Image (cartoon, rainbow, N blue to C red):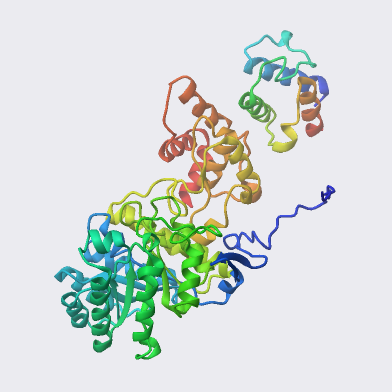
């Protein structure tokens, strides 16, 4: 899967969870500061990415991801 | 001033020589304890407790029963049998005392005797008068406690006697016990509020002179009854409240050896356990307690706490079976119908239950962070989390993994339980809930959100 394909799906999942338009999500958006995620929302987001890509990720690594761009890179790396 | 440099180690120092986890944390001493008596310094060697034959005596069915509705005979026999297994074959729980007054009291002793258990040995409890002593003889007991009140509060205001009259009465019953071949155990009631040099020590010295006429196994035992919980374990506390001074004088000035001295406390000032344990350290062998501390008013030294203290002081189990403590607590709740306080150490429903999410997180990562010792192996009580809005996703993950019995790599991550945690938070934030989530409700959520795991769990 190309990075663009991963990005489209990460943005789509993120927009749905935060009830936003995909066009309003930027790669530089930080989950907590810009999107207003609390700790449970951050976990729900990773869980939603897992469902989207059919993967189970390591908790410690996944929870280090801080912004949308990091998430795209993280899943792109796993899906290579 | 001494300077301490940071030692940036590569592996953690968990101080396992003191906190082995496979046993309760060990109690270690460095050097002797000094006490000032009559202006002179005397020493106690606390490490002596490692080799001395310290043990526990029980009064669950005497003092313990004075503070609650009576037990049925079947309860007492079952608890007696469990007590025997808890204390083990080496008699860490050495004796248990019983009332003798009613037909039921005596039938219970017969039923316990019929179990043919080596420990605890059955002893009696009577008031110090000859009429009561007849009951001891009829039951064929080898030892009996007798009430020999020692403070003027009791002698003057309860018994309406002079000190001389009280002492004469006590001595007559002790002599009668010797004649009948029964070992007397004098319970020096209210000793921490007594005139020690004016009554207690002369009385004990008289008992010692009487004891010179009988074989070693018959010599009078002395129970130090801190009836109102006034005793103090602090070094250099003043008499008569000082436990160290009292024990020192009884041993060194009255000639009573450690194996003939026993401590019996009460919890009126929250000192009941530490006073009992301190009495062991300061040189007596027997600590008298009751199951879960039930006893007159605020209660007695908790027997199960004394057993844990014993293991911590000795550094080994010595035949003790700690899991019986849990069995006894369940018996109290399910059969006798007595609810133990949830946060009561070692046995309460929540004694090793954490509620805070940050603690649950620690517990999930490394159990030893928030568990006092291996409660799963030793007490058959795995550490738990109670689910509230403060438990966090870590707490929910811990609960779910423990419920499903998942180990190691199988254990579910916080992502897998996020939907359950969302349901929990909605209960509080949207529904305005005020109570904890019950285990049954949590199980229902596992069934809804993790059906494949739930089915697998049901099959196993």
Q: Position of residue A45 (x, y in %)?
A: 66, 25
**What residue lies at 57% left-to-right and 50% top-to-bottom?**
B371
Q: Position of residue B168 (x, y in %)?
A: 25, 77
Viewed as shown, does residue B379 lie left or right of B30? left
Viewed as shown, does residue B365 lie left or right of B299? right
In the foreground, B49 or A42: B49
Q: Position of residue B322 (x, y in %)?
A: 47, 64
In the foreground, B289 or B268: B268
**What residue lies at 58% left-to-right and 31% top-to-bottom?**
B418
Up/down of B278 relative to B402, above or below = below
- State the image quarter where residue A11 is shown: top right
Viewed as shown, does residue B283 lie left or right of A15? left
Up/down of B385 relative to B320, above or below = above
In the foreground, A6 or B311: B311
Viewed as shown, does residue B302 lie left or right of A43? left
- State the image quarter where residue A48 is shown: top right
């Amino acid at each position: 899967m190309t990075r663009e394909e991963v990005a489209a799906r990460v943005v789509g999942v993120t927009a749905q969870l935060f009830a936003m338009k995909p066009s309003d999500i930027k790669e530089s958006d930080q989950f907590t500061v810009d999107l207003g995620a609390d700790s449970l929302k951050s976990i729900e987001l990773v869980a939603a990415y897992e469902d989207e890509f059919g993967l189970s990720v390591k908790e410690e690594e996944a929870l280090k991801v801080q912004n949308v761009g990091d998430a795209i890179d993280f899943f792109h790396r796993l899906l290579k | 001033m001494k300077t301490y440099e940071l030692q940036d180690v590569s592996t953690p120092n968990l101080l396992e020589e003191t906190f082995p986890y496979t046993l309760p944390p060990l109690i270690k001493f460095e050097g002797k304890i000094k006490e000032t008596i009559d202006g002179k310094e005397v020493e106690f060697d606390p490490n002596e407790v490692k080799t001395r034959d310290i043990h526990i005596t029980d009064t669950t069915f005497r003092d313990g029963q004075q503070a609650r509705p009576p037990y049925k005979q079947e309860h007492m026999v079952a608890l007696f049998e469990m007590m025997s297994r808890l204390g083990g074959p080496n008699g860490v729980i050495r004796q248990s005392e019983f009332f003798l007054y009613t037909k039921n009291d005596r039938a219970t002793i017969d039923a316990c005797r019929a179990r043919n258990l080596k420990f605890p040995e059955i002893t009696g409890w009577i008031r110090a008068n000859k009429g009561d002593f007849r009951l001891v003889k009829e039951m064929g007991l080898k030892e009996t406690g007798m009430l020999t009140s020692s403070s003027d509060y009791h002698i003057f205001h309860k018994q309406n006697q002079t000190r001389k009259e009280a002492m004469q009465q006590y001595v007559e019953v002790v002599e009668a016990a010797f004649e009948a071949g029964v070992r007397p155990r004098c319970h020096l009631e209210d000793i921490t509020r007594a005139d020690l040099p004016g009554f207690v020590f002369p009385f004990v010295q008289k008992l010692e002179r009487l004891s010179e006429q009988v074989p070693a196994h018959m010599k009078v035992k002395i129970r130090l009854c801190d009836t109102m919980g006034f005793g103090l374990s602090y070094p250099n506390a003043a008499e008569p409240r000082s436990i160290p001074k009292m024990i020192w004088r009884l041993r060194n000035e009255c000639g009573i050896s450690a194996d003939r001295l026993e401590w019996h406390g009460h919890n009126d000032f929250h000192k009941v356990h530490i006073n009992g344990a301190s009495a062991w350290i300061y040189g007596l062998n027997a600590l008298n307690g009751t199951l879960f501390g039930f006893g007159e008013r605020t209660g007695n030294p908790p027997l199960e706490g004394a057993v844990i203290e014993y293991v911590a002081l000795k550094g080994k189990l010595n035949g003790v079976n700690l899991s019986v403590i849990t069995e006894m607590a369940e018996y109290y709740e399910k059969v006798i119908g007595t609810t133990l306080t949830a946060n009561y150490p070692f046995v309460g429903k929540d004694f090793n239950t954490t509620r805070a999410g940050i603690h649950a997180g620690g517990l999930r990562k490394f159990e030893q962070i928030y568990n006092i010792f291996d409660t799963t192996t030793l007490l058959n009580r795995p550490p738990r989390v109670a689910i509230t809005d403060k438990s966090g996703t870590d707490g929910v993950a811990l609960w779910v993994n423990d419920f499903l019995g998942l180990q190691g790599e199988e254990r579910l991550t916080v992502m897998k339980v996020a939907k359950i945690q969302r349901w929990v938070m909605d209960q509080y934030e949207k529904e305005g809930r005020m109570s904890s989530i019950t285990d049954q409700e949590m199980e229902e959520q596992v069934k809804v959100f993790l059906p494949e795991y739930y089915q697998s769990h049901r099959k196993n």
